[in-house]
Image (cartoon, coloured by chain):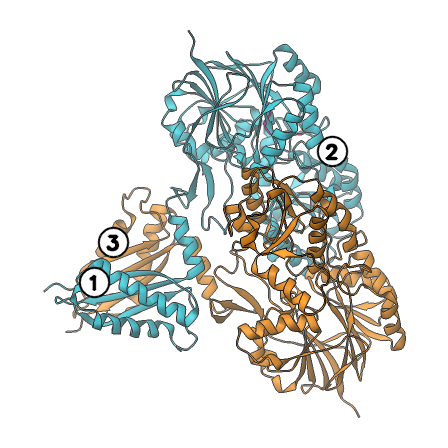
Chain colours: A cyan, B orange
Amino acid sequence: MSTNRLIYLPLGGAGEIGMNCYVYGYGPAGKERLLVVDLGVTFPDMDTTPGVDLILPDVSWLAERRDRIEAIIITHAHEDHIGALAHLWPDLKAKVYARRFTAAIGRLKLEEAGLPLDTITTVEPHPAQIEAGPFKVQFLPIAHSIPESSALVIDTPSGRILHSGDFKLDETPVVGEGWNPDLFDSIAREVPVKVLMCDSTNVFSPLPGRSETTLQAPITELIKAQKGMVVATTFASNVARLKTLAEAAQAAGRTICLMGRAMQRMVKVAQETGVLTHFPRTIPPEQAAEVPRGNLMLLVTGSQGERRAATAQLSRGKYLGIEMKEGDTFLFSSKTIPGNERDVIRIMNAFSEMGVNIVDDQGGKYHVSGHANRPDLEAVHALINPAMLVPMHGEHRHLREHARLAAERGITADVITNGMMVNLTGDAPEVVEYIETGRVYLDGSVLIGAMDGVIRDRIRLALNGHVTVTVILDENDELLGEAWVELYGLPAKGQRAPDLAAAMESELTEMLNGAGRKVLRDEDKTEEAIRRVVRQVGVEEIGKKPEVTVVVSRMEA
Amino acid sequence: MSTNRLIYLPLGGAGEIGMNCYVYGYGPAGKERLLVVDLGVTFPDMDTTPGVDLILPDVSWLAERRDRIEAIIITHAHEDHIGALAHLWPDLKAKVYARRFTAAIGRLKLEEAGLPLDTITTVEPHPAQIEAGPFKVQFLPIAHSIPESSALVIDTPSGRILHSGDFKLDETPVVGEGWNPDLFDSIAREVPVKVLMCDSTNVFSPLPGRSETTLQAPITELIKAQKGMVVATTFASNVARLKTLAEAAQAAGRTICLMGRAMQRMVKVAQETGVLTHFPRTIPPEQAAEVPRGNLMLLVTGSQGERRAATAQLSRGKYLGIEMKEGDTFLFSSKTIPGNERDVIRIMNAFSEMGVNIVDDQGGKYHVSGHANRPDLEAVHALINPAMLVPMHGEHRHLREHARLAAERGITADVITNGMMVNLTGDAPEVVEYIETGRVYLDGSVLIGAMDGVIRDRIRLALNGHVTVTVILDENDELLGEAWVELYGLPAKGQRAPDLAAAMESELTEMLNGAGRKVLRDEDKTEEAIRRVVRQVGVEEIGKKPEVTVVVSRMEA
């Protein structure tokens, strides 16, 4: 009697947009062979993760079972799908499969981390198939905002899974393969799809998505109409958009210059892998300053306002010898991701001060999304007609709405979020276990757990400032000299005290002189008494309770 | 020969949305009598102002000339126009004028700060006029998203100024006086308007603004269709919206409960001042739990995701005995202000997890803006036909676009930002001086300058963490014992070192033992050497340079 089961366990991306990492398993309970789809990152912010460099999924559940991992599949080369590969691969050490362009980007990451490049195997798309234990996987070309995005056909002894990856229904995506409904129709007819795992990003967008090609005419028209220098930004990985922008510039008789490391790298890899052809000739930044402004077009990184990217640099002044001037035009051929508004707006205002004309996406005229909108999702539901639908790649509200949408069509659908292990063997997803999972922070050069308290302490430092108190006790546990206070991130003056540190010192010295040996002999009691005084003076003088580090030194007889 | 001149000097609000404070002056250069319009605040964020409570304009220029201030006018009771009154009034001590509702809100602020209430004089609207030195001021009722917003007619010996305040062209604003084009037409015909100072907030919104009344039908329909509890949020000061929401609830047979201090206060003041009449009966929160969910409607604070407001509290669980449940509906009858997206989205997802139906403004179906859109601004330009236009209440990009729009009509228009003093006596604004101005932070209970470095240090603490180093030197300037290190907001382990603090201590002890008297006798050299070691170990072990507090104690012989 077979007790094999088919399981699904998202470790990232289900209940958030970013940090995608989905696990499938097949085999006896607790002994399933595992297939990992994507190893992505998400990005930190000052509110919740100050000082952090990258956020990765916590894959310790996988790492503890790494002998059971048959393969790691990367669907496409966006950072939220591939960004954690080099950081987490050493814990997993499984074979990685990706299509040519994605594999090339992945190898660059492995190379930087000093990891073996043959870790990644380049695969051909459907009908080629890879075998990974009980899984047979085919990569189906599908349109997205990066070349060679793939949906996955995952055949298991329990039935066929269609993992959509990130996609849109664009039949003419400018670069790479377009949406091919006949292919997906044939996949669904060949073997009925048991479960459709489906991108939920744009489930709240009510109108059908538009093709990348719809941007060509308006962008060309816009660039032709400009007299000064034209600068455009978009995601570096949106190679199709880069091509559209570059061709429009060429049509307007402009020389093209790529600025920003990511931009140059993406175009290079896209060309080397044969994904991008007929891209107009570009000049290096050091030659750009010699081209008359009216004949120049820069394609730059930093559409989300990233501080170190080319857009932000240009907004602060000269960058690589180039400076924006009155009469120039800056095009944001992009959408601002929620949370990045302040940074983008700051840049727009800096350009405004320079007299630069700022053009944003203008409600879609100069930008289209890479994800399927609600009517597109409905079309896919109808085409694939799966027995079950599990929404992925979305915040909770997206997953819930997507499940509702599928249920309307009579498809069994459930909201499954990070850490929920579900059994897909039967007719409906059945939750069998809750896995402890979460986030890991790359902080400088080390990985720290999101729950370690390190970042919580940094947030407290930012909100409350810091006070160092040093006291020296002699061999009789009596205060030697006076308490010493140093402030960091706190005002020098209080409401009454002209010197906040001095006010704390005198209160502390008084307290310590009167505290008695019973308190001062006890490390914890002494520290607690000191903290209490610092906070009390803080509240009285500045209306704040600072964070406190206490160092008590004891002189030995 | 008269050397009198008419000047304009924005100290806040020109080059930003928020913190409005505009100064007019008339008289001999350097001796102008001054009129201050609005004393607003803006709000801090974690990225740039962690731990700060409020941001105020730096009015030291005004404070140094306070004997020249004839009056402070408050146009309306939004925080970005009145929020700094109680904080800054003690530095200015001039007479304050406002209409009834605004004055009542202002007096509440003065009362909390223990300031004299008779500071504020309640004024009647046009045709009543106040005299303030060379200025004659009339308050013109104008529609906005708060009751009794006023445009100001400011008559000076140099001509008539129309200061728009915040406004929209709503002839039926549900509460308070609507836009009255005849009144404004008569003002402009009576005496030609020399300068129109004009709200620029929505200059990028291409469609005409819509009336508050357009929301009544859709909101009523929405609430009637719900079965569970309905909760709605909007700005507490949007009294008209509260009325629309409450009346819709009443029509659906629901009992209304106001939650959140600001909400209760605004309704109370609006009723007491006669601005709000026929507001449906409400019950206090402690009675709400007894009402069947299907018959209950909560109106709550926190539309921008503010952590301590009712909306956020409800998203975290029980609040004042009430809990959201599956099948309830939460309506955001509001727009998310740029920068608040993450907080609002976090709350939406928390509600989604509870099974609550979330309804947002749906592209304007359940919310309208309080500011004039581009076509509305054009209509005002045409109606008033001023000799000059100075855009205000906008970021640089708004001011620039607004000036461009006016110039298209042949109106002289210039972008004047905070700190630029312009002479308006002639035919065009002429910049005569740059005033040092900026921002002041209310941090806990004290005011600190934006450039004092306190907040910069707090940001550094958040990004880099903090290390305290304590060393004790004996009477011969030799290290007594070992260096002592305490970490705050840093990982306990490094890449190689199992104990980061211990690794720093041993490097420090080694360095100090070998440093020699020349270094150790010198306070600065010792500290610098210690900092260098801490940062070096930081970079090697965790890829970060922490902030460092060094305390060197010296034992005397």
Mark 3 residue type: Glu
Q: Mark 3, mark 1: which one is toward the viewer?
A: 1
Q: Which mark is residue A553?
A: 1
Dot 2: what SS?
loop
How far apart in space, not on screen, are marks 2 and 1 (Cα)?
69 Å
Name the residue carrying label 2.
A210
Subunit bearing disc 3? B
Query: For this view, does B218 lie left or right of residue A334?
Result: right
Image position, residue A38 (x, y; %): 51, 29
Name the residue carrying label 3.
B505
The tag earlier along the polypeptide, 2 or 1, is 2
Mark 2 residue type: Arg
How far apart in space, not on screen, are marks 3 and 1 (Cα)?
15 Å
Subunit bearing disc 2? A
Residues packed near mark 3 inside 10 Å, few (<14), some (14 to 19) or many (20 plus): many
User: Which stretch appears magenta?
Assistant: A164-168
Dot 1: what SS?
strand
Q: Mark 3, mark 2: which one is toward the viewer?
A: 2
Say yes or no: labels 3 and 2 on the same chain: no
Count of numbered circles in the view: 3
Query: For this view, does B32 lie left or right of residue A491?
Result: right
Image position, residue A247 (x, y; %): 73, 37
Mark 1 residue type: Ser
Quarter assignment of residue B153: bottom right
Report the magenta stretch's main SS.
loop
- Vertical arrangement, residue B258 with respect to residue A69, above or below: below
- Vertical arrangement, residue B121 with respect to residue B507, above or below: below
